């Protein structure tokens, strides 16, 4: 391929706004004049299910990512980041929230804690980045835009040229005006967070 | 996204749309007059977008959510007979329901033009089967378009309407989940001034499908298919690319085209191939295919689902005495599931006799699953719990399709069989006739109007012994909260409510009770009353969907539940009732107040464990 391609696997829990984030990021790449398609699986969000989506940048046509294919894993929930690990190729980049929404039905499988999850992710890839999104959101009272904090941080780990302006313009196109300011604050929070360990 | 941008009259502007949104735009550019739909994943975004847009597009088209897909196709057929361009949308199993009108509508023809969107689901992302609806185009003798990306979805929709009007036959626009929910760049065309309605010309020798007419019309249908074939032969949607001199030919359709193109652009194969991408998969462009394959030594057919192209292309080779190896399905590429880029890379490597690639194995971690479950506050959970606690342990649960299907999940396990829409009542009746066990059927309000009425009539008429529980939450919830006749229409002026209790009375059923599905005591009393009776019994368990009530009916939550007493009873409630709002931190059970909807079912079920707490600042409640 002449242009550099990028495969991003996004995962989270229904209700976290993973699909909205995918749409915002897709539009941001489009604003950056990059060829982009997205694969979204709509449906189980409200029932607390896993929501996976894919972003393919640089002229790729297939709207899905197979095991071992993703360049970047963007996880809005830490448990889902661990669950989706096999989508990432070894030493791909991980950017994950450290927040965990506990699954509702507990069976006999042990619920891993964040330390366990972080250690597993670090073992898989040397390029691991973590962000306590909910804590950051709570400080600025923007809990509804928790996902956007991760998108702001994404700008720092993305190998392609993507700017804060690209993200902001995406929000301006997609969301009603009353949500713009909160999302811009969220982007800035994530973007300025330099400690991603 | 700002959905109203779909109405923008900005020729040549580009937008990043879901393919479903692109289909809406395509229909608008074609000048569609009427849309008739029954919701079904992955097609539901189409009627929903039209419905939402209708607030601003009052004179452009009419949209209706029909009671089922057969009804939708028939209403649209009538509209097309009257001269309108109609769009009918459904998921793949919906076409089974609509197949009756489809077959004969194709015989009589529809002058106004009809496009049928069938959204198939290879891999069963959210369906009870993965049937391949390309079969229907062949069986009905109608054209079939298969887009592979969002822009093509739009373009094909426009062309499908043109073809439908030209040959006066329904046209099938066949998609799959990966396409419907794919987002890609779409270039807008012009929005037309209103497309004309072709006025109806009386022709009883055509439109009245009695045997004498049908025999003649079948021949006309096949002639119209030939016209479509000329279109297919010349269509720019069938594309040849790659190395024209190669002896290795690959023929591909649907989303698989994307996997193939990515495969050859990202992996270094030693040999080159020539490619035929088919966008029109019925009628097949036979001459085009013949010309493509005759210079090949071997041809590989890549299609998800059944081996339809494979069989037809083998027949073309046979008719022309071509000595070519034609390959399609094998042990790796079966009729089951979906393809992917890496599956195609592997298949191509074998086809070209090149080194096979084995992807690295990764041991999947066993993690707590996150299956979809009934929402916190959902009254279906209370109904199931009441049934389970009152009725005898050997009762057989006949279930159906909707949000309440999630009652099958642990720990409720309230489903022993479920086949298709409406089968809860009918298959339940049949089971009860043979078995000694009591049978209870669970059916939702939308499913009830979809295909429960005929089963109910049969149960009464043929004197079946079954307890039917109508789970009435007043909305078609699972597919995204679409309207149906059971819905509260206080805030809507173009839909009329039908009261389910009136329907039950109208059927002459005397053994029925209507209760609030959020009232555990009433539910247990109802089940106790009905369980030992014979014949057809009905419990209408009514409670608006908790999400719909909050969003659209303006219901405000004033209280949350809190755990008052830890111990065995609390543990039992957590294990057996399992509301998603229950959580356990350091062996202490509590209610997550951001998830609790204040339905107070847990208080009713376990009064020693829970009590209610008033919410401090009601407006700041951040329930999503």
Image (cartoon, rainbow, N blue to C red):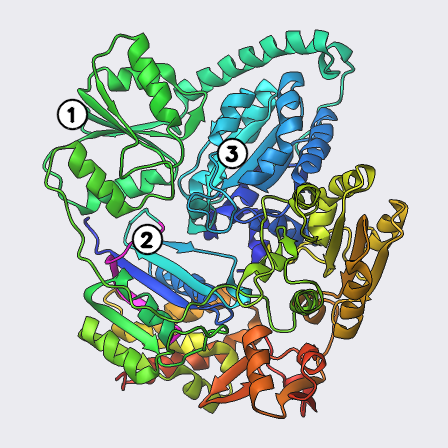
At horizontal 27% and vertical 85% (from top left) the residue drawn is A194
Q: Nearer the viewer, residue A156 or B359?
A: B359
Judged from the image, the secondary structure of the residue bearing numbered disc 2 is loop
On the rendered structure, is B2 left or right of B313? right
Q: Is residue A78 left or right of residue B57?
A: left
| Residue where numbered disc 3 is placed | B173
The Cα–Cα distance between marks 2 and 1, rounded to whole angstroms, is 30 Å
- The CA distance from mark 1 to mark 3 is 32 Å
Name the spot of residue A49 as percent of width and height, x first.
48, 65
Q: In which image quadrant can residue A51 be found? A: bottom left
Label 2 or label 1, whichever lies nearer to me, is 1
Q: Position of residue A19 (x, y in %)?
A: 46, 63
Disc with the residue nearer the chain's start (1 vs 3): 3
Label 1 packing within 10 angstroms: few (<14), some (14-19), many (20+): some
Residue at the image point whose x is 28% and y is 66% from the top = A85
Q: Which residue sits at x=17%, y=57%?
A: B360
Q: Name the residue nearer the viewer: B349 or B27.
A: B349
Q: Between A176 and A103, which is closer to the camera in this rendering?
A: A103
Residue B430 sits inside the magenta stretch: no
Residue carrying label 2 = A35
Which residue in the protein does label 1 denote? B246
Q: Main secondary structure of the magenta part?
A: loop
Quarter of the image for the C terminus of chain B: give it: bottom right
Q: Which segment did they paint magenta?
A: A63-77
SS at mark 1 in the image: loop
- The answer, for residue B250, to whether it is visible in the render is yes
Check the residue under mark 2 and report the chain it is in. Answer: A
Q: Is residue B616 left or right of residue A134?
A: right
Asked if residue A70 is among those painted magenta in the image, a careful observer would answer yes
| Image coords of residue B234 (percent x, y) | 40, 20
Chain ID for label 3?
B
């Amino acid at each position: 391929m002449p242009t550099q391609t990028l495969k991003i696997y996004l995962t989270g829990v229904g209700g976290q706004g993973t699909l909205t984030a995918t749409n915002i990021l897709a539009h941001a790449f489009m604003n950056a004049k990059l060829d982009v398609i997205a694969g979204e699986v709509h449906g189980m969000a409200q029932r607390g299910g896993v929501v996976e989506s894919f972003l393919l940048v640089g002229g790729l046509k297939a709207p899905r990512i197979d095991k071992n294919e993703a360049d970047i894993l963007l996880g809005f929930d830490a448990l889902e980041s661990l669950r989706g690990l096999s989508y990432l190729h070894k030493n791909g980049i991980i950017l994950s929230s450290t927040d965990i929404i506990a699954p509702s039905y507990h069976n006999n499988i042990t619920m891993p804690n964040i330390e366990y999850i972080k250690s597993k992710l670090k073992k898989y890839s040397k390029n691991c980045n973590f962000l306590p999104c909910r804590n950051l959101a709570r400080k600025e009272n923007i809990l509804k835009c928790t996902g956007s904090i991760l998108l702001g941080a994404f700008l720092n780990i993305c190998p392609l040229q993507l700017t804060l302006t690209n993200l902001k313009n995406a929000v301006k196109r997609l969301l009603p005006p009353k949500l713009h300011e909160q999302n811009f604050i969220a982007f800035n929070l994530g973007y300025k967070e330099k400690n991603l360990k | 996204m700002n959905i109203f941008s779909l109405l923008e009259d900005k020729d040549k502007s580009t937008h990043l749309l879901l393919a479903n949104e692109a289909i809406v735009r395509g229909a608008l550019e074609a000048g569609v007059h009427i849309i008739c739909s029954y919701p079904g994943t992955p097609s539901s975004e189409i009627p929903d977008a039209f419905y939402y847009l209708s607030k601003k597009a009052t004179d452009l088209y009419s949209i209706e959510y029909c009671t089922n897909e057969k009804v939708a196709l028939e209403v649209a057929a009538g509209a097309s007979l009257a001269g309108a361009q109609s769009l009918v949308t459904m998921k793949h199993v919906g076409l089974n329901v609509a197949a009756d009108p489809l077959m004969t509508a194709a015989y009589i023809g529809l002058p106004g033009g009809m496009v049928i969107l069938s959204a198939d689901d290879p891999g069963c992302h959210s369906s009870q089967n993965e049937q391949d609806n390309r079969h229907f185009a062949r069986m009905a003798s109608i054209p079939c378009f298969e887009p592979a990306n969002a822009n093509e979805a739009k373009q094909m929709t426009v062309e499908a309407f043109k073809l439908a009007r030209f040959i006066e036959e329904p046209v099938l626009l066949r998609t799959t989940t990966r396409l419907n929910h794919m987002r890609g760049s779409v270039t807008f065309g012009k929005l037309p001034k209103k497309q004309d309605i072709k006025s109806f010309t009386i022709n009883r020798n055509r439109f009245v499908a009695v045997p004498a007419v049908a025999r003649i019309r079948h021949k006309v249908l096949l002639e119209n298919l030939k016209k479509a074939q000329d279109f297919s032969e010349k269509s720019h949607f069938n594309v040849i690319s790659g190395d024209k001199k190669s002896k290795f030919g690959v023929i591909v359709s649907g989303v698989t085209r994307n996997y193939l193109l990515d495969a050859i652009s990202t992996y270094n194969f030693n040999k080159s191939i020539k490619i035929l991408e088919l966008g029109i998969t019925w009628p097949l462009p036979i001459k085009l295919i013949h010309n493509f394959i005759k210079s090949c030594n071997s041809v590989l057919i890549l299609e998800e689902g059944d081996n339809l192209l494979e069989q037809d292309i083998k027949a073309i080779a046979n008719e022309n005495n071509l000595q070519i190896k034609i390959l399609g399905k094998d042990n790796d590429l079966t009729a089951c599931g979906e393809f992917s880029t890496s599956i195609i890379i592997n298949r191509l490597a074998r086809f070209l006799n090149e080194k096979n690639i084995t992807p690295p194995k990764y041991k999947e971690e066993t993690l707590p699953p996150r299956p979809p479950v009934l929402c916190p506050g959902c009254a279906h959970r209370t109904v199931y719990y009441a049934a389970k606690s009152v009725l005898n342990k050997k009762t057989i649960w006949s279930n159906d399709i909707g949000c309440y299907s999630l009652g099958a999940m642990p720990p409720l396990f309230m489903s022993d069989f479920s086949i298709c829409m409406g089968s809860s009542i009918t298959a339940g009746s049949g089971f009860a006739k043979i078995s000694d066990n009591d049978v209870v059927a669970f059916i939702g309000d939308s499913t009830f109007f979809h295909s429960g009425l005929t089963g109910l009539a049969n149960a009464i008429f043929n004197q079946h012994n079954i307890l039917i529980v109508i789970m009435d939450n007043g909305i078609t919830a699972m597919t995204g909260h679409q309207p149906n006749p059971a819905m509260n229409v206080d805030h809507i002026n173009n839909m009329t409510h039908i009261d389910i209790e009136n329907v039950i009375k109208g059927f002459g059923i005397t053994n029925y009770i209507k209760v609030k599905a959020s009232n555990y005591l009433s539910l247990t009393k109802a089940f106790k009353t009905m369980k030992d009776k014979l014949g057809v019994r009905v419990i209408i368990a009514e409670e608006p969907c908790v999400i719909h009530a909050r969003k659209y009916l303006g219901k405000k939550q004033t209280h949350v539940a809190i755990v008052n007493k830890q111990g065995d009873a609390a543990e039992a409630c957590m294990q057996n009732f399992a509301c998603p709002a229950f959580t356990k931190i350091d062996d202490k059970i509590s209610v997550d107040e951001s998830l609790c909807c204040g339905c107070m079912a847990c208080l009713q079920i376990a009064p020693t464990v829970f009590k209610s707490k008033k919410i401090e600042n009601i407006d700041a409640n951040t329930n999503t």
